[in-house]
């Protein structure tokens, strides 16, 4: 991947954690391959995970009935999303590969990462209709989920509590 731009969206509050180690290894390996790395360390950034009216710096389309998806789509088109969202969207724009590094909490992302996805991947920037999935706005980007489970191998096996985690 020489010359590629990599964004690592990292969501763990402890730098010495397994997730922190995996992030550091990814940085080392990718830099040795000639990649440029940008890290969004959501906890150290104190990233605001709450999707609210405050994400829009301009006037709302319908201030009497706030609909986050519709309002942020229009705000994106008008260039009036708040600064922290715009900064993260710029990182996504230049990235060839986006790595999401996180611990699995209740079979999902941590809330801070979910908030990053909700606030950054707004309609018009990350997707639009009918252009979704393989024809979507981010179709030329690669994404990698790298996560720890905090559970035993048996918990995530075929006969485990929730079945094989590798199965869709």
Image (cartoon, helix red, strand yellow):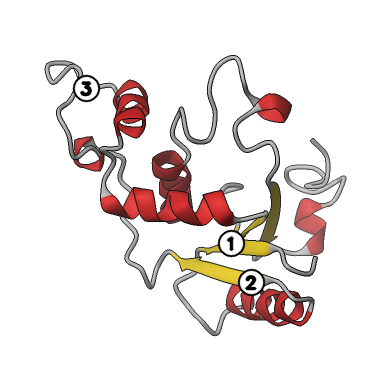
**Residue 95 marker:** none
- Viewer-proximal residue, 3 or 32? 3
Residue located 14% across and 28% down the image: 59
Residue located 50% across and 64% down the image: 11
Q: Mark 3 points at which residue?
A: 66
Measured as percent of width and height from the top left, residue 164 is found at 82, 45
Q: Mark 1 points at which residue?
A: 7
Residue located 18% across and 16% down the image: 62
Badge 2 local density, few (<14 within 10 Å), some, or many (20+)? some
Q: Mark 2 points at which residue?
A: 36
Measured as percent of width and height from the top left, residue 14 is found at 48, 78
CA gap between label 2 and label 3 equals: 39 Å
Q: What element carries label 2?
A: strand
Badge 3 local density, few (<14 within 10 Å), some, or many (20+)? few
CA gap between label 1 and label 3 equals: 32 Å
Quadrant of the image containing the N terminus: bottom right
């Amino acid at each position: 991947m020489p010359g590629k731009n990599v964004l690592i969206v990292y969501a763990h509050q402890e730098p010495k954690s397994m997730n922190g180690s995996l992030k550091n290894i990814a940085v080392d390996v990718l830099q040795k391959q000639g990649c440029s790395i940008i890290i969004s360390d959501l906890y150290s950034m104190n990233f605001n995970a709450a999707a609210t009216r405050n994400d829009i710096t301009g006037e709302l389309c319908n201030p009497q009935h706030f609909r986050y998806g519709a309002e942020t789509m229009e705000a994106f088109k008008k260039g009036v999303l708040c600064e922290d969202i715009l900064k993260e969207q710029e990182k996504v724009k230049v990235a060839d590969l986006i790595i999401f590094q996180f611990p699995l909490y209740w079979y999902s992302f941590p809330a801070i990462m979910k908030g990053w996805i909700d606030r950054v991947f707004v309609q018009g920037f990350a997707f639009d209709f009918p252009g979704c999935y393989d024809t979507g706005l981010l179709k030329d980007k690669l994404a990698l989920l790298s996560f720890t489970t905090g559970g035993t191998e048996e918990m995530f096996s075929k006969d485990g509590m929730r079945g094989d985690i590798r199965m869709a």
